[in-house]
Image (cartoon, helix red, strand yellow):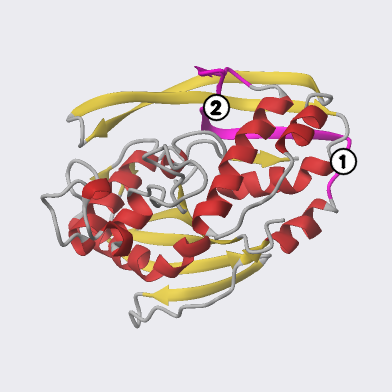
Amino acid sequence: MLEWFRFARYTFTLVAEEQVTLPGYKGSLLRGGFGAVLRRICCANRKAVCHECMLRNSCVYSCVFESSPPEDAAKLSKYRDIPRPFVIEPPEEAKREYLPGDTLNFNIILIGEGLRTLSYFVFAIGELARTGLGKSRGRFQLEDVELKVNGMKRTIYSASDGILRTTDTAVEYKDVEAEAERLDSGYIKVFFKTPTRIRFNGDLAYGVEFHQLIRSLLHRISSLAYFHCGEDTELDFDDLIAQAETVTTKHKYLHWLDFSRYSSRKKQELKIGGFVGRMDYEGDLAPFLPLLILGEYLHVGTATTFGLGRYELE
């Protein structure tokens, strides 16, 4: 199960070269800017819609940013979109004003085949920084990129020499299982750090029972494994969900948080949000700890490429 599931978290550091004002929540800014630059770099057929383009299976932009299931996919083939093989984690701070020399740090998690596109991410983020962020297009410089895996930190790119030092180092499922063995398997606190959007029976949930959280994680992780890691998890969903339904909610401290983002596709401001806060669960948690730890890295629910659905366990 999940033998081939691999991912890695990279920290990007940008340094402001001039005064610039950015939104408090920067997930939409980073995702939208990165996507626009990546398409400019990769797209050879601008007139085509990605899912109809004959080049889509070999185009990095299409595979990363407009992921869709292969025509011969045995699962989820009826869906146009599948989970993207990356997550953007914007800075937690809501700082808006940046002066020359100030730093902007954020994380990008690459999953499975997405790890092969690291050089495109580094180049595109560097171009985004150079051309400018925010409405005023304030210019930054990509100072460095740091790999963080299993407590190890390593600088893989530095502006001082402009060289990207690629590496095969990544977190594997066996590492997640080892981490799970160190956690309390009877009581857990889940701190939802960014707006979390989980649908249950078609509706957005305001907080989730434990089985709803596990359902969402199972769907996300199994889809990422199948489409981006080449692996069928063969998880017994029905049995895991039945076990999850025996776990009880002990405390719930939540509120709803909205923010607006501009959609270049729809040419309008869109409101997007979800619940943040804390939920405590009690029961036999041991079978679910690896899934919960994976979710800390991969996020849960929808709009994870914006940084939504980030949580931490205690």
Q: Is residue 200 magenta?
A: yes
User: Type of residue at label 1?
Assistant: Ser
Residue 185 image label? 1
Q: Position of residue 203 (x, y in %)?
A: 51, 16
Quadrant for the C terminus, please.
top right
Q: Position of residue 111 (x, y in %)?
A: 52, 58
Residue on which the image places disc 2? 198
- Seen in the image, is 100 located left or right of residue 105? left
Which of the marked residues, 2 or 1, is nearer the chain's N terminus? 1
Q: Which residues are magenta?
A: 183-207
- Seen in the image, is 251 located left or right of residue 163? right
| Residue at the image position 41 percent from the left and 61 percent from the top | 13
Q: Residues within 10 Å of mark 1 (few under 14, many from 20)?
A: some
Residue 144 image label? none
Work out whether residue 170 or residue 151 is closer to the camera in this orientation and state it: 170
Q: Nearer the viewer, mark 2 or mark 1?
A: 2
